[in-house]
Amino acid sequence: EDQVTQSPEALRLQEGESSSLNCSYTVSGLRGLFWYRQDPGKGPEFLFTLYSAGEEKEKERLKATLTKKESFLHITAPKPEDSATYLCAVRDNAGNMLTFGGGTRLMVKP
Amino acid sequence: AAGVIQSPRHLIKEKRETATLKCYPIPRHDTVYWYQQGPGQDPQFLISFYEKMQSDKGSIPDRFSAQQFSDYHSELNMSSLELGDSALYFCASSSLDSGHFTSGNTIYFGEGSWLTVV
């Protein structure tokens, strides 16, 4: 059974204070690790997909990296509008659905 | 760009009633997924359909059923509603390349349907 654990559960940053969110996973045959952003009461918004260890992807202030056991979402000089819950999910060889971690609630204060 | 459309956005039902949620996937997407997200929880996979056939099954209660129609829209039917069914229900869609297990197909989510059971 796939397992995804995200840490920390909650993170408070000052505007401009860079940090990283962690996603540790156990999966039989990784077929993709996904990062989503979710605002309260809204659907998850797709950010990145990573497929193999060593892969990196960037989008504005966000950068996602992947190893064989974990993924990091690095946030550089965050702004208050980056406040949201960031969800990590994996897809394995057994099916096409995603298994999500518990998410990290990020709050960026001005 | 067109997104996943869900209706209704909000729904209030009483215990033991029945509810139906609808999902219209992104055009040309052939796979639909249903997820349930309780307050403060991560999304839990319920069921998915590929080309109108059930493809994967998660933690969907026996009281729930779903199907995908010829136009690829999907409906989640929930009967004998319980208080614990109150949640945000997401539909998501993706497009599979040739073959069922091709990687690379991102799953896009709708805005969700809020179900409150009173």
Image (cartoon, coloured by chain):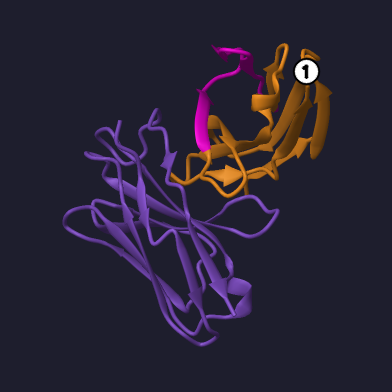
Chain colours: A orange, B purple
Read off the magenta span: A45-69
Q: Magenta segment: does it hold A51?
A: yes
Q: Is residue A48 above or below residue B36?
A: above
Residue A47 image position (x, y, % from top left): 52, 26
Instruction: Assess whether residue B35 is covered by the magenta stretch.
Output: no
Name which quarter of the figure residue A105 lies in. Answer: top right
- Marks counted in the figure total 1
- Residue A56 image position (x, y, % from top left): 58, 12
Q: Is residue A8 in view? A: no
Point out the image quarter for the C terminus of chain B. bottom right
Q: Is residue A84 visible?
A: yes
Q: Residue furthest left?
A: B70
* Badge 1: residue crowd in 10 Å (few <14, some 14–19, many ≥20): some
Picture residue at 81% right of the left edge, 15% below the top: A17
Looking at the picture, how far across and down is residue A100, in whole percent? 61, 44
Q: Residue at x 50, y 67 (%)?
A: B60
Judged left or right of residue B10, residue A75 is right
Amino acid identity at mark 1: Glu
Chain ID at mark 1? A
Give the residue pinned by disc 1.
A15
What is the chief secondary structure element of the magenta stretch?
A: strand
Q: Is residue A25 above or below residue A99?
A: above
Q: Decide: is B27 above or below B74.
A: above
Is A100 placed left or right of A72 in the picture?
A: left
SS under mark 1: loop
- Most foreground residue, B68 or A4: B68
Q: Position of residue B12 (x, y in %)?
A: 50, 73
Quarter residue A75 falls in: top right
Quadrant position of the N terminus of chain B in the picture: top left
